[in-house]
Image (tube, rainbow, N blue to C red):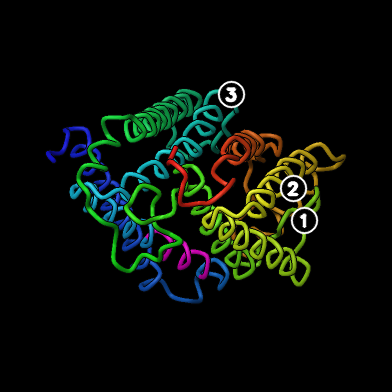
Amino acid sequence: MKRSAGITISAVLVFIGSGLTLLSAALMLLGFAVMPADDMPAVTRGAGLIMSVFMLGLAAWGIATGVNLLHLREWARISMIVFSGLLLVMAVPGLIMMIVMPLPTPPVPAVPNGERIPPLEHLMTAVRIGMAVFYALLALLGGWWAYFFNSRPSKEQFRNAGAPGPAWMPAVLAPTELPGATKRPVSITIIAYLALVGACMFPILNILHMPLTFLGFFFSGGKAALIVIGYMSVQLLMAYGLLQLEKWGRSLAIYYFNFAIFNSIISVILPGAQARYEAATAAMQTSMGLPPTPFQFPIWFSLVFSLPMIAIQLWFVVTRKQAFEGPHNSLTPH
């Protein structure tokens, strides 16, 4: 079946974004290679290397998605929906932050006598407008992808192409609409993928010795490691249960997302939350050899990032109850 222009354009955009991500990761690795080890704390170097590897993984994921978009493979359509969700989660709160939050005023530069100092407030206004436009464009792209790849014409293009998924993909991870795969709603598949990615990201917190917030308090060291192990275990188990369409997997996901909402809110409203956050941030900056930042991020703004993402996943898990009822292979994809 002939590809639509929208799919081809999306593949090109994915290739461009993946190329820029790959270039950024390569430049970062090059910087670490040429910079003397004594000029940078070990924690900072480790964080940068982990970020570089993460960016390389994102670039590889993007390139694989772009190639398979051109071949109209169903898993690439699902991947684009995941991309759109990640873009919206990143761009919408960023846009709100650029609109409502004050930016720090940079220090006045030293200039020779007689020369005019450029108005710093104009510079910061230009930065605010530029970043707001950037986030708005990302949000528009994410919204368009979410609509386009969920539309009926797009679904029919991928379904009629009949291209199978990768041979290495286990059956439990197979997309929902491939022949022989479990009839699993796309939304449940995406939530399970996100849980798997989140479980893999948690150990990085321990490697970087970053403080972990839990029920309004910050933990580090052995206590943080125990919390990370608990989060990883729950997310891996939840992902498996969702992918297998087990009733206990759905129940576990509902409990987990409700707890995540409670944990996010209690971490903000408990007395002294802002002070604990600033102390944890200062301790992390000191351990990484970074100078203290002159601008403190309001902790309440974290809810703008976390609550919509958690609530959307909870809504899908609650409303897709039918997929977990009865024989799995008799279900129709949503």
The reply to whether callout 2 and callout 1 are in contact (CB within 8 Å) is yes
- Furthest toward the right, the residue is 271
Tell me the number on the disc at residue 100.
3
Q: Give the amino acid at mark 2.
A: Tyr
Upstream in the sequence, badge 3 or badge 1?
3
Residue matched to label 1: 218
Q: Nearer the viewer, residue 209 or 39?
A: 209
- Lateral position of residue 85 relative to residue 41, left or right: left
Q: CA distance from mark 3 to mark 2?
A: 21 Å
Dividing the image into 4 quarters, which one contains the C terminus?
top left
> As drawn, is 204 to the left or to the right of 254?
left
Does residue 183 appear in the picture of this structure?
yes
Q: Position of residue 176 (x, y in %)?
A: 40, 49
Give the mark nearer the N terminus: 2 vs 1. Answer: 1
Residue 73 on the magenta segment: no
The crowding category of the residue bearing disc 2, from other C-alpha atoms within 10 Å (few below 14, some 14 to 19, many at least 20), is many
Q: Main secondary structure of the magenta part?
A: helix
The kind of secondary structure element at disc 1 is strand
Please name the amino acid that badge 1 sits on.
Phe
- What residue sits 31% from the left and 60% below the top? 60
Give left or right: position of 70 versus 60.
Answer: left
- The quarter of the picture where the N terminus appears is top left
- The residue positioned 80% from the left and 41% from the top of the image is 266
Crowdedness of circle 1 by 10 Å Cα count: few (<14), some, many (20+)? some
Report how far apart the C-alphas of labels 3 and 1 lie in the structure.
Answer: 27 Å
291 or 94, nearer to the observer: 94
- Judging by the rendered image, the residue that carries numbered circle 2 is 277
